[in-house]
Amino acid sequence: MLSAVLVAAAAFEIVALAEGVHVALVRPDPPSYAFANALIIEDDETVTVVDTHQSLEAAEALIDEIATLTSKPVAFVINTHWHGDHVYGNQVYRDRFPEVIFIGHRATRAEMLSAGAARLSEELESLPGSIEQRAQWLASGIGPSGEPLDVDLQQRIETSHRLRSDYLEELRELTLTPPTLTFDKELTLKRPGKTIRVIHFGPAHTRGDVVVHLPDDDIVAVGDLLEEGAFPYFGDAYPAGWEKALNGIGALRATTTIPSHGGIVRDPRLLQFHFRLLRSLRHEVEVAILKGLTLDQTKEQVTLSGFVADLPGSEEGVRTAVERMYLEQTEELEP
């Protein structure tokens, strides 16, 4: 494995947002499983970190990066929701800072221990096969589509093989570490020199999404409620609530928004895009239901063609979004 210092340098771009506030933006093609940005908030005594990455290696690397900014301990970790790319690194913070308090919505804790545990088991079961598949491609010199490997494709497969192999070893050591301090609507940390609001607008991307608002700095970290550069993931979503959450984010009127995936946002276009997407999704599915279309027919008819251009994963993403909206509108979606 690469040293933590090298991983930190390659995985993250650390950007100062305000006095004592930095964002760790994940660089393209990082050398470890790090997919979600992290917010680093330093008060007069301690540090608060928002989200902890998918791999233990990435979490270790960010902690080492934080140590170059301040000698203060990490006292709080806030998880915006339960998905692995936001919480798997919690274990590292627990080990490095035994007194750390993990903060999240009560539904995030519950889902980490149920759906999160099930998803972790699925990863442990599926990863060995995907690693072996890549080993076979490299050994045969024939790629996934039957094409001979050129230098670029070989390098990409080698990188994927290494990342997945390292990640599998980490997962075998992983203990899910859920929030220890939970809440329902809003929790405010009044720290010396910083006020940190943690707000739940209702079920949205998951049942327990929270945003982290720094009112004195005009900054809000929104987790996966906004996503830049890819079609939003609806696999665990409550679309009507997601619209409500977007309204809540807009009402904060923060000048700087940090999505978990993408860059620093300082204009309203990303929020407006998600508004339009969700409203169009709701309207088109409503029309399909009024026509008496089945779920499968609706998934074929509703394509959201105006929202998917050049967005990775959009074809399957749209079908998932349509299904969640259809189930929600027909009252078949579990609350």
Image (spheres, helix red, strand yellow):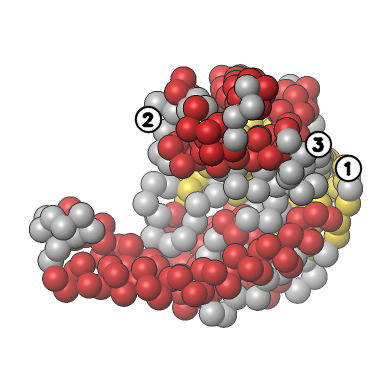
Q: What amino acid type is highlighted by mark number 2?
A: Asp
**Residue drawn where x is 31% and y is 74% of the image:** 132
How crowded is the residue under tag 1: few (<14 C-alpha within 10 Å), some, or many (20+)? some
Relative depth, front residue between 74 and 169 = 169
Left or right side of 117 for 198: right
Left or right side of 307 for 18: right
Q: Which mark is residue 201?
A: 3
The residue furthest front is 292
**Residue drawn where x is 47% and y is 78% of the image:** 169
State the image coordinates of residue 302 (x, y, percent, origin top left).
52, 27
- Residue 210 appears in which quarter of the rendering? top right
The quarter of the picture where the N terminus appears is bottom left
Relative depth, front residue between 18 and 155 = 155
Whole-number angstrom distance, CA of label 3 to CA of label 2:
30 Å
Q: What amino acid type is highlighted by mark number 3?
A: Phe
Q: Nearer the viewer, mark 2 or mark 1?
A: 2
Disc 1 is placed on an element classified as: loop
How crowded is the residue under tag 3: few (<14 C-alpha within 10 Å), some, or many (20+)? many
Q: Which numbered disc flags the more N-terminal residue, 3 or 2?
A: 3
Mark 3 and mark 2 residues within 8 Å of each other at the beta carbon: no
Can you see residue 302? Answer: yes
**Residue drawn where x is 26% and y is 65% of the image:** 158
State the image coordinates of residue 243 (x, y, percent, origin top left).
71, 28
**Residue drawn where x is 37% and y is 30% of the image:** 310
For disc 2, the marked residue is 310
Disc 3 is placed on an element classified as: loop
Q: Which numbered disc flags the more N-terminal residue, 1 or 3?
A: 1
